[in-house]
């Protein structure tokens, strides 16, 4: 994060980041997005104002599935990704609650209220 913020600042822009909790940050394992978001939450709660957003691969059903050409769509699991693997609904709710609490803590620490 520091390296990215330094590069942004060097270009004359405000060092603000949206962090992708998936892909390289989670070692391409969808379930690793949860501890990644917990770490982002700790940074937010500690007052880091460079973080302005988080991208999370999320869907109703965890994981991913393949859809072979010619296979009926009805054979797919409703609510499960056919592209990137995602965390499921319950974990998505927990991640959002964790991040929301962290933002509240950051706002309180900075004196900006709710």
Image (cartoon, helix red, strand yellow):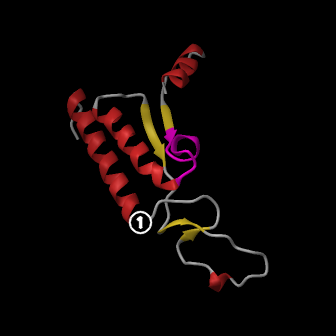
Q: Classify 69 as above or below 13.
A: below
Q: x and y percent of residue 36 in the render?
A: 43, 43
Count of marks, rendered view? 1
Q: Secondary structure at mark 1?
A: helix
Q: x and y percent of residue 8 in the render?
A: 56, 21
On whether residue 27 falls in the magenta region, the answer is yes
For residue 102, say whether it is visible: yes
Q: Is residue 82 left or right of residue 26?
A: right
Q: Classify 88 as above or below 104.
A: below
Q: x and y percent of residue 76 in the render?
A: 62, 79
Q: Classify 79 as above or below 74.
A: above
- Label 1: few (<14), some (14–19) or many (≥20) C-alpha neighbours in 10 Å: some
Q: Name the residue nearer the viewer: 3 or 13.
A: 3
Q: x and y percent of residue 103 in the render?
A: 30, 40
Q: Is residue 92 left or right of residue 56?
A: left
Q: Which residues are magenta?
A: 19-29
Identify the residue shown where x is 41% and y is 65%: 89
Identify the residue shown where x is 28% and y is 35%: 45
Residue wearing tag 1: 89
Q: Classify 41 as above or below 5.
A: below
Q: Name the residue nearer the viewer: 85 or 101.
A: 85
Q: Is residue 76 left or right of residue 49?
A: right
Residue extending furthest right?
Answer: 70
On whether residue 31 falls in the magenta region, the answer is no
């Amino acid at each position: 994060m520091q390296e990215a913020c330094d590069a942004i600042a060097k270009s004359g822009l405000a060092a603000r980041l949206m962090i992708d909790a998936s892909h390289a940050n989670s070692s391409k394992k969808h379930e690793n997005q949860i501890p990644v978001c917990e770490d982002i939450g700790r940074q937010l709660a500690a007052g880091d104002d460079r973080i302005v957003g988080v991208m999370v691969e999320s869907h109703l059903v965890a994981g991913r599935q393949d859809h072979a050409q010619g296979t009926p769509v009805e054979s797919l699991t409703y609510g499960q990704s056919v592209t990137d693997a995602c965390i499921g609904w319950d974990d998505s709710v927990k991640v959002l609650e964790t991040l929301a609490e962290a933002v509240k803590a950051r706002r309180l620490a900075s004196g900006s209220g709710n």
